[in-house]
Amino acid sequence: MSKLNRINWKYALGEVIIVIIGISIAFSLNQWAENNKNRNIRQQYLQSLIADIDSETEHLQNNIEAFEQKIQQIQRIMPYLYGLQNGRDTIAMKIFSLAEIVHFKPQDVTYKTLINSGDLGLFNDFELKKRLEDYYSSHESIRMDYERQHNINEKYFADFMIYNVEFDEIRKGDYSFMDDKLLKSIVQSLYGTYGFAIQASRQGMERARQTKDILSLRLK
């Protein structure tokens, strides 16, 4: 009876060991599958972040070109303000076009998804997370430099067009509104804001390049 019990005990111990090994293997396989799934998700996020940055870089480059065109317009406009040069009819239209605002539209859909979903925790790379946080928080400084043109247009240019410009007289060929010193000050102020916006856009593009380099390294 004692020998039989000893044999059963060894058998039971063997069964326990087999079960433990089976559980360990299953756990390892599940962990491997989970890690592989997380890795695939991280890769998808990295690719999407890079695509967003590429899109934002193109957007900023287009804005720079738009601002440079506006600066060129102002350089052509300035000699006609408070002066009686010929060709004021075509220049007047360029003045009106300055009311069109160039907007900054951050491409941050993927980053917001990472934050709102909690998936940022999938990235255990401190340097990468800090770079992303710094990059997307820098959008606020770009937005502020773009906001200058909006403020001038909203507070001064719009009022000037409403209260100081007689469009019926313009149709008759009267461009005397261009002699108003206030208009010259507004145009000069816009000229300065465009320069600030170009500088902010170029800095944003450089930050985008640096961030993309880090993302690309992590993607390999």
Image (cartoon, helix red, strand yellow):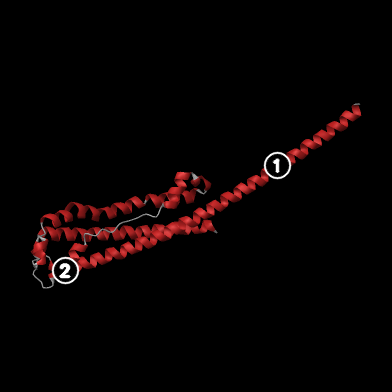
Q: Disc 1 and disc 2: Cα gap in Å?
A: 80 Å
Quarter of the image that includes the N terminus: top right
- Density class for disc 2 (Cα within 10 Å; few <14, some 14-19, many ≥20) is some
Looking at the image, the residue that sits furthest to the top is 1
Would you call the spot at circle 1 few (<14 residues within 10 Å), some (14-19), or many (20 or more)?
A: few
Question: Residue tagged by mark 2?
Answer: 91
Secondary structure under the numbered disc 2 in the rendered image: helix
- Side (left or right) of 45 relative to 60: right
**Image quadrant in which you'd find residue 180:** bottom left
Numbered tag placed on residue 24 in the rendering? 1
Q: Earlier in the sequence, mark 1 or mark 2?
A: 1
User: Residue at horizontal 40%, vertical 51%?
Assistant: 136
* Residue at x 77%, y 40% (from the top left corner): 18
| Above-or-below relation of 123 to 100 | above
Three-letter amino acid code at the position of disc 1 = Ser
The percent coordinates of residue 90 (x first, y second) are 16, 70
